[in-house]
Amino acid sequence: MRASILVAVLTVGIMAISGGLFAADVPPAPKASTFAPAQDLVVAVDSYIERIGEALADANEFADLQSRVVKDAETVSVLALVLGLHDEDNSYKAAASELIKTSQAVAQASDYAAAKAAFEKLQAAKTAKGGAVTGWIRVASLKALMEQVPLVNSRLKRNLRRFDRQAEGIAVDAAVLAAIAQGSMANLDETIQPSNSEKWFAFCEQMRDAAAAVNKAARAKDEASAVTAERALAKSCDDCHAIFHPEGVGKTE
Ligand code: HEC
């Protein structure tokens, strides 16, 4: 009797695991330095926070810029996550969990006053300490991240045409795309195929690694490699959209 109960419990347990009743865990990531140098992400965090501040300088402007503020704040959340888990020491490692919490509050603020109050906390969070980030958890909405990606990608492509002058900006944008790709793995549940974890993780990796190659080429001042890597990056957009965002195939500008 006891044995049969044990067998039943085990069987249900195994079915639950193989049937995907439990959310798929994000696969282990390589060291963040291999796809997004901490220094590039720190520069990006500063520039997104600065841009949010500009949008909040004036209540009338904010009405027009609120959707950009949401995208930028959600981007800060993901960048802070990667910096918190980063193998390279960096100025936001200790602040990461506060940066995530406060940038999420900025993204969720419903009006100008709330956004401004949340932004003050975000700025204070830059020097926060403690509250370590523990793993590749979901810190942003997939929709907001996927609205940010084409904007960053378009700027990156534009800058590729003036490679010598813009190598720095290309490297930073590529690191941001790599970080968003890695961070998006945790957003599987928000996709149209939440049970297709294998493909989702593989496409996120494909985008992350292609963006990482653009970053490395830009840092090496190697224009030809940067152009080749950018093509692989564009392919990753289309490959993923073919399955997870069919209406977006070919619309990566
Ligand atoms: C890992 C899969 C994946 C990769 C890689 C990917 N996307 Fe997406 N993309 C999506 C999904 C899923 C959505 C739909 C998000 C939603 O609305 O919830 C989307 C939405 C979009 C949208 C529509 C956003 C809107 O306004 O609603 C654009 C544009 C886009 N992606 C551009 C890109 C570009 C450019 C790249 C490559 C640099 C890229 N994507 C890489 C999965 C991906």
Image: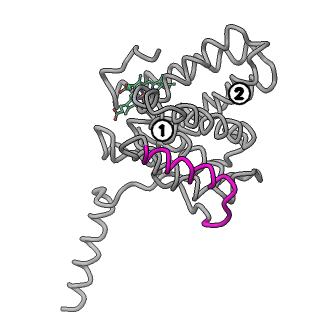
Left of 245 or right of it: where is 158? right
Residue in front for this viewpoint, 96 or 21: 96
State the SS at label 2. helix
Mark sitting on residue 4: none
Residue designated by label 1: 202
Q: Residue furthest bottom?
A: 1
**Image location (x, y in percent) of residue 70:** 44, 37
Left of 223 or right of it: where is 136? left
**Image location (x, y in percent) of residue 84:** 64, 55
Q: Is mark 2 within 8 Å of ligand 1?
A: no
Residue 116 part of the magenta-drawn span: yes
Left of 245 or right of it: where is 209? right
Which range of residues does the magenta coloring cover?
113-131
Q: Residue at x 31, y 67 (%)?
A: 14
Quarter occupied by the N terminus: bottom left
Left of 125 or right of it: where is 141? left
Residue 127 part of the magenta-drawn span: yes
Residue in front for this viewpoint, 109 or 4: 109
**Image location (x, y in percent) of residue 233:** 56, 23
Q: Quadrant of residue 192?
A: top left
Reply above or below: 90 against 164: below
Mark sitting on residue 171: 2
Reply above or below: 84 against 72: below
State the SS at label 1. helix
Q: Main secondary structure of the magenta part?
A: helix
Residue in front for this viewpoint, 126 or 135: 126
The amino acid type found where label 1 is placed reads Ala
